[in-house]
Image: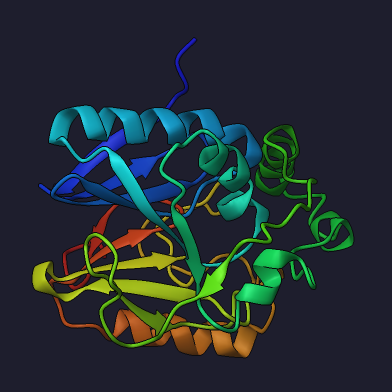
């Protein structure tokens, strides 16, 4: 059975992909691709299939780089399988303060004890069941990752500009595409989540953040971007800042 996902054409060369549990983004430039994030372990087939579908539609078939907003299991869990499925050996890149997290020199992720503090919330329990089923308890990292520079366009397809948005993790990075007024916000700003009863720009529940105060600051920074900026979040739908309901 084909893996479940939905591709949203944000621009002719920018695609937001909604997987079963989390989003990822694909940027194209000529025949080349950049992938941003790679889902849970169980999402790997959907990531692979979405890359193939976008390649068939656009002619962009060479995966040159994988960028990581952060190293939680729902964003890098599928990474190893996705890279192993490719013949093009893409570079895997993350912000300098997140590289050790990707490699699993340490792991900063919500704990079972933190989740169980919310055992009376059915939304949290449904999310937890789905996360476990998707491989969320697996803690593998990805050793072959390199740090990219910050605050200037990267030499990868799409030329995204990385900006530090720490707090959710200590090295969390968002990626701007200024030429079209977009920002890939990862989990620094989301627009929905199974644990939330509302839709629209918001933070994840505080149990998910390594440093809640810094997460607050990063969220405010993203919210303060110019009206009309479109946000491609790690969870939830595409949103336009300043639009009614945003």
State how many labels appear.
0
Q: Is residue 187 visible?
A: no
Q: Name the residue furthest right.
A: 113
Would residue 121 appear left or right of 188 to someone viewing this image? Answer: right
Where residue 221 sits: x, y (%)?
Answer: 37, 87
Q: Nearer the viewer, residue 30 or 166?
A: 30
Residue 240 lies, with reference to residue 64, above or below; the image says below
Q: Nearer the viewer, residue 144 or 150?
A: 144
Q: Quadrant of the C terminus?
A: bottom left
Q: Residue at x 69, y 71 (%)?
A: 101
Where residue 190 sits: x, y (%)?
Answer: 43, 62
Q: Residue at x 74, y 36 (%)?
A: 129
Where residue 243 sits: x, y (%)?
Answer: 16, 66
Residue 112 lies, with reference to residue 187, above or below; the image says above
Q: Nearer the viewer, residue 60 or 45?
A: 60
Q: Residue at x 65, y 45 (%)?
A: 123
When asked about the image quadrant of residue 186, the answer is bottom left
Q: Nearer the viewer, residue 114 or 131?
A: 131
The colour mode here is rainbow
């Amino acid at each position: 059975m084909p893996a479940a996902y939905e591709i949203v054409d944000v621009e002719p060369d920018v695609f937001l992909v909604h997987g079963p549990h989390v989003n990822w983004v694909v940027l194209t430039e000529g025949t080349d691709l950049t992938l941003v994030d790679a889902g849970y372990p169980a999402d790997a087939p959907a990531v692979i299939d979405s890359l193939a579908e976008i390649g068939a539609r656009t002619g962009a078939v060479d995966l040159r780089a994988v960028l990581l907003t952060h190293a939680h299991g729902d964003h890098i869990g599928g990474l190893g399988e996705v890279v192993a499925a490719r013949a093009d050996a893409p570079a895997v890149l993350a912000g300098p303060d997140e590289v050790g997290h990707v490699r699993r020199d340490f792991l900063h992720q919500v704990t079972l004890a933190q989740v169980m503090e919310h055992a009376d919330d059915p939304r949290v329990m449904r999310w937890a069941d789905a996360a476990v089923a998707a491989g969320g308890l697996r803690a593998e990292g990805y050793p072959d990752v390199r740090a990219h520079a910050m605050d200037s366009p990267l030499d990868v397809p799409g030329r995204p500009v990385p900006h530090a948005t720490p707090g959710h993790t200590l090295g969390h990075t968002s990626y701007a595409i200024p030429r079209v007024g977009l920002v890939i916000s990862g989990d620094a700003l989301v627009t929905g989540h199974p644990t939330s009863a509302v839709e629209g720009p918001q933070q994840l529940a505080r149990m998910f953040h390594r440093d809640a105060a810094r997460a607050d600051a990063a969220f405010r920074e993203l919210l303060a971007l110019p009206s009309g900026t479109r946000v491609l979040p790690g969870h939830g739908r595409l949103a336009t800042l300043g639009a009614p309901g945003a």
